[in-house]
Amino acid sequence: MIKRRVHVAAAAIFSSDGQEVLLARRPSIVDQGGLWEFPGGKLAPYETGFEALKRELHEELGITIKRAQPLIRVPHEYPDKHVLLDVWQVHEFEGEPYGREGQAVRWVGLDDLFNYAFPAANLPILRAVMLPPEYLISAEEEEDTRFLSRLERALGEDGVRLVQLRAKTLDESAYLERAEKSLALCRDYGARLLLNADPGLLDKVDAHGVHLTSERLMTLERRPVAQGKWLSASTHDRVQLEQATRIGCDFVTLSPLRTTPTHPEAAPLGWHDFQQLVEYAGMPVYALGGMTREDANRARAVGAQGIASIRCFWR
């Protein structure tokens, strides 16, 4: 059987403070009725995703988009169809949204999203909505005071809200001590901390999750952390992206986009190949490798969640 292909534009519409997102409930008489979803609808012939988004949100919610940017594109296979969700992030709009077609709509806090039932294709969107556009990878610092000072500057002055604790030069005892101190700082600023270490260390430090090196990723047969924790991984090609999907990673970094001083031997992906791999990933992807904040908009334009970096944020 040849499956029909359905292209859908959907919106993650944020409240003015960025702490809530608007959900709509599918009517009980339609496919997957009663489930909650991000508002949107099918593209009409010759429409772009953004054109469809503007039309659908006006028809469904009575609002006019003022500014939107790509968030994630999610391919999903159902038994009878292949769906491509073209998801946009909307922060500025005119009008007060309401269910113009009689559907229930509701503002929901980001921390409450997983308490709602969604179609299976929406799971990567939930992750993308909850993740920030910047992912800090900490630098190797021998001295704790200097390390914590730089971390606090990134959290406070730069507003970083997602941190990977990378400290390959420390033994386990020193790493755990630094992780506890880093976690306390991250909690003070409402940021998440992921350990770039053996997943078993989560039993000793209640961090928000774990980041897997590509080497560790490829040795695993199943997800090594509970669903309530975040799991990310370093990827460099399609095979590693497939493995990240197989074991249930929540998001990944994809590198190197450019040649970097730390890995001059690694062939850069470039924007074209990076975009092709992001389209294939089906989960939030951070661009890594020579990234600066000036690259953030371009990274989002080609489908990335945002940028990951050491030097850009570790000043």
Image (tube, rainbow, N blue to C red):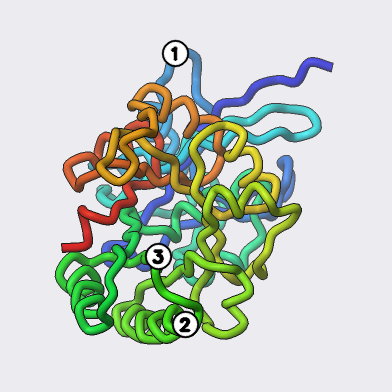
Disc 3 secondary structure class: loop
| Amino acid type at mark 1 | Tyr
Question: Dot 3 surroundings within 10 Å: few (below 14), some, or many (20 or more)?
Answer: many
What percent of the width, then of the height, locates residue 123? Answer: 60, 51
**Residue at 68% over, 48% down:** 120
Q: Closer to the N terminus: mark 3 or mark 1?
A: 1
Q: Which mark is residue 11?
A: none
In contact (CB < 8 Å): disc 3 and disc 1: no
Mark 2 or mark 1: which is in front? Answer: 2
The quadrant where residue 223 appears: bottom right
Residue identifier under label 1: 46
Question: Dot 2 surroundings within 10 Å: few (below 14), some, or many (20 or more)?
Answer: some
User: Which is more toward the observer, 170 or 269?
Assistant: 170
The answer to whether 157 appears left or right of 43 in the picture is left
The span from disc 3 to disc 2 (Cα, nearest Å) is: 12 Å
Disc 1 secondary structure class: loop
Q: Closer to the N terminus: mark 3 or mark 2?
A: 3
